[in-house]
Amino acid sequence: MASIPEIFETMAYGPAPEAAGPAQAWLEGHGRSFGLFIGGRWTALDGETFETLNPATGKPLALLRQANPTEVDGAVRAARAAQAEWWGIGGHARARYLYALARQVQKHSRLLAVLESLDNGKPIRESRDIDVPLVARHFYHHAGWAQLMSRELPGREPLGVIGQIIPWNFPLLMLAWKIAPALAMGNTVVLKPAEFTSLTALRFAELCHEIGLPAGVVNIITGDGRTGEALVTHPGVDKIAFTGSTEVGRLIRTATAGSGKKLSLELGGKSPFIVFPDADLDSVVEGVVDAIWFNQGQVCCAGSRILVQEGVADRLVVRLKARMETLRVGDPLDKAVDMGAIIAPVQLQKIQDLVQRGRDEGAVLWQPSWSCPREGWFFPPTLFTEVAPAATIAQVEIFGPVVVLMTFRTPVEAVELANNTRYGLAASVWTENINLALDVAPQLKAGTVWINCTNVFDAASGFGGYRESGFGREGGREGLREYVKWAEGRTGAQARGREGAKARRRRRAGGQRPPSSLPPIDRTTKLYIGGAQVRPDSGYSLPVLDADGGQFGEVGHGNRKDVRNAVEAARKAGGWARATAHARAQVLYYLAENLAVRGEEFGRRIAALAGDASAAEREVSLTIERIYTYAALADKYDGQVHHTPYRNVTLAMPEPMGVLGLVCPESPSLLGFVSVVLPAIAMGNTVVAVPSTSAPLLATDFYQVLDTSDVPPGVVNIVTGIQSELAPVLAAHDDVDGIWYFGPAEDGGSAEVERLSAGNMKRTWVENGHARDWTDARRGEGEEFLEQATQVKNIWVPYGE
């Protein structure tokens, strides 16, 4: 009888097919034919057409329209007509649209993933688990930049109409890389997907229509190089953003020279994968799998050149060959497949020709013993050894699952070999010696250097190349600058003020809703501790009065024991700080979404308490916008790298304080509460909040929003009561790491909080009687709050010999 290890050694994977039915039904629903998406409408299929094929079978998927120069002109005109209004609606409105696109991508993620694998040939595991989640991430992230544009990029304005041309290797992800920052900065776009892979771009056009994106903001035109040329040379385009081959990029640079068009080019690569002798070779092998056999090697930054220290080269080759034998090539919709199909016969032929060229020049080829499927266009993982640095296969981008291996002796030689290329897109360094890694990385001529990892991307990090790999960046703050220009004759402060005035006028433009003639139904409100509604320990309640002085409701009268329980709950929720900033941002966006659903209800509550329906509506609107601001900032309040006068990289990292006690302002009750709580939790803190004494019902209503928005238990705890009683308890509590006091000034609360905080030397932030206008974005939100919510840790990392 076989042992369990023996069973695991011999057990073969069975097929795990992904259902293609919904994607096929979508294609059938369109008659397997698509026009162009221009000005928010679909054009007819009249004129020249072409087929898009399934690389795994070679069979047609759909018939697409070849856009001619007249149609390209129509798309540019539609984008131009829409641009002024798109910029004019303001950053918050653009953020809402981008957020809606992110949500739509998530809602239709499986359909998009299957379409991508059908059209492109990549394994469903990659499109489902890498591409589509990153697409949503880019729209979430850039929704935040839209919200923050006037604050973070003062004095900048959009370029206008952007022409975007994307490749076939990451069709939907490249679309997101291009469209999300362009729209966030107030531009409109005309995008041409690759003729081989247009289907997910066309489905994305439908998503734009479904969310009500204004007509002309996004236009999708399909076609081959002729369509791209018409877009590049169109005089109405203000910028061209291109990802593709260096050869085509060179043509675009020539064609746009002297035109005044801004240009960003993300081109080819021949990225080095450097392995030092102390590297973990098992990790290196898996890194090679991710570097060159991810997406069949059809990746511009693929680690196609393994440079390994000669002392460990033989061991690495043995392990690589063993791993290559276990790779599975086959149907991209099989979830157990590692490699799918090559995009098209022309690309397969190019790979085959270059492989033969490598053999002819004396390199030693090795491929696994198994064979690839006969139907469709497949190529096995391939390893070349004994490769000369000047060999064709060591210099030319193959864009397929082919890797060459060369050896070096010293780090100096490794750097020389790595830089021995006309490209400079990316590199990866593998070593357990951080000193060595940080010494080598700055010497590599590449826009991105990964250490002990490869092919890692995120919307917050810029990506782009040196040398013949192009110029410009996509992603991160630097990627935003590709889509803006300095406003003529206007300083940053003037631009910020003008944008703020526009935003205030937009907010005032909405109609007033009269309050309901019936009083709201009262309910028993409790404290909110550890994600649960709990009755106050005191057993007493406090009355809440309406605008006319009548009793409107009651809240619990919190005491010292309630504060103790809340602090314990906040301390137990420390996992919130370990969540990714992106995850926290999504939860905060969800808060805004759920508050918006109940906006009228909150407005009526505020109006009943304050007696002003117009002000109530404005307060709810500002509250939602403020939540958006901190959702946007959650993953953008970054650290810095300091240039200290030593051989060091000194990393300054903002970290959450821990448990914060927050005494919220008396008014505005909802906006003031959110303005204090949101920056604290956006940075990863957990909080014990004491809301307004006179109008706490908005805070107790808000915990229902917290309950439905995936906020983990204990992250936000609410203790209602008399602020002058509860603030000293929080200030003296030794398990509270910081306290903010925005409570009444007349009772000496600020001084008392500061005095009592000396027990554990907690950090304090008090107003000392200075009034703050919470409706003013300059005083009621922003970096000041984030600075108070964090503390900076400096990490000194030495490098060099």
Image (tube, grey):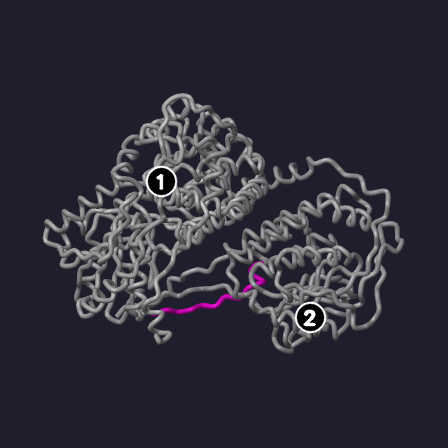
- Is 634 left or right of 373, judged from the image as shown? right
Q: Quadrant of the N terminus?
A: bottom left
Percent coordinates x, y for residue 93 in the rendering:
59, 40
What secondary structure predominates along the stretch shown in magenta? strand
Nearest the viewer among 423 and 656 is: 423
- Is 442 left or right of 782, judged from the image as shown? left
Nearest the viewer among 772 and 587 is: 587
Instruction: Label 2, secondary structure: give it.
Output: helix
Nearest the viewer among 335 and 441 is: 335
Nearest the viewer among 491 and 675 is: 675
Q: Which residue is mark 2?
A: 566
Residue shown at 25% from the left, 44% from the top:
468
Percent coordinates x, y for residue 510 in the rendering:
70, 36
Task: State which quadrant residue 20 falls in.
Answer: top left
Percent coordinates x, y for residue 634 in the rendering:
54, 56
**Where does the magenta region start and end?**
786-798
Task: State which quadrant residue 438 falls in.
Answer: bottom left
Q: Which residue is mark 1?
A: 54
Instruction: Label 1, secondary structure: give it.
Output: loop
Percent coordinates x, y for residue 747 in the rendering:
78, 66
State yes or no: residue 792 in magenta: yes
149 over 428 or under it: above or below: above
Residue shown at 74% from the left, 75% from the top:
561
Residue kind at label 2, given as amino acid type: Ala
Question: Does the rendering let one see residue 480?
Answer: no
**Label 1 near label 2: C-beta < 8 Å?**
no
Q: Quadrant of the C terminus?
A: bottom left
